[in-house]
Image (spheres, grey):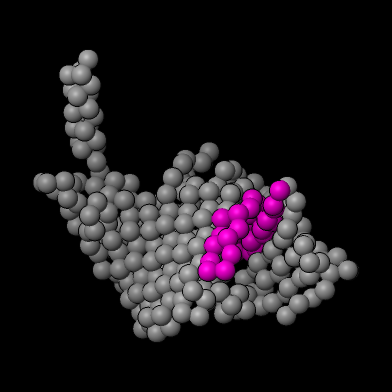
Amino acid sequence: MKNTFFLFLFFSLLLATACNPARRAKGGKLRPRSEKYLMKRLLANQVNAEWIGTKAKVSYSDQYMRQSFTAYVRMQKDKAIWMSFKKFGFEAARALITPDSIFVLNRLSNEYLAKPFSYAQREFRLPVGYDGLQAMLLGNPVFFSKKSETGVDGDRFLLTQKTDNLVTKYWMDGMKIFLQEFFVEDFRNKRTLTYKISDYQSLPDKQNFSYFRRLNLNSPDLGEMQVVIDFTKVEIDVPQKMSFSVPDRYERVD
């Protein structure tokens, strides 16, 4: 029985190696691939959807607090991102984000916030705009430059881009060229963003969506913030309701 098990394991390893489209070199290392090839595969693996509706378990932590809740996130491409956050079955907050504005209802304090999108970028030191936020929700890469340097980092491919104030890195797995990690360093302001992506699953239209995300944002003024997202339901290309209204009794805050 023991010998049979090891024989099965041996042939499994042979099969995995033979079917590996990354073409590993001798010794198990990846062979470097061209920028054109990696970018083509990376772009081909992007999730493309006019609508998306999700449910997720979310945990948030920084140096002052730690919270966990259930989030419902809906998006209409290039138009709006709608979010509802629930705790113990009750809605605690609701948000609506458009390319130029952000609105937030605080159900616990009967307050609301209405600001331009640039406010959220400044408040949370985001290195991405609305398009970048939309891409990150889908699990797609966010590009800051048209030129990349390629390399191999262990069992993953690596693309590196540089601009006047940013260094960005994209790690992809060596088999299917799925994005696994996205890193941005704003060295002028000493801020970093790390976005790790995993647990890819096939959607009904055969696109692959990553169900697990971990985001770390670090800056001298805000310290370190971490958001962990575990999607439990994903619906694609089905129109979603995005109701958002401010009750008369709510007070606006700045």
Give the quadrant of residue 1: top left
User: 79 left or right of 175?
Assistant: right
Residue 188: in magenta span: no
Q: Report the residue that reaches farthest toward the front.
A: 64
Rendered view: 254 above or below 231: below
User: 126 left or right of 166?
Assistant: right
Rendered view: 142 above or below 89: below
Residue 77: in magenta span: yes
Give the quadrant of residue 192: bottom left
Q: Report the residue that reaches farthest toward the left.
A: 26
Measuring from the top left, give residue 226's x and y in whole percent: 50, 63
User: 14 left or right of 222?
Assistant: left
Instruction: Decide if residue 185 is in sight here.
Output: yes
Image point 48% across, 49% down: which residue?
Answer: 212
Image point 22% across, 54% down: which residue?
Answer: 154
The boundaries of the magenta stretch are 59-88
Measuring from the top left, give residue 2's x and y in whole percent: 20, 19
Measuring from the top left, give residue 127's x and y in whole percent: 48, 74
In depth, the one of 90 and 84 nearer the eye is 90
Instruction: Decide if residue 138 is in sight here.
Output: no
Image point 24% across, 58% down: which residue?
Answer: 153
Type of secondary structure dominating the magenta stretch: strand
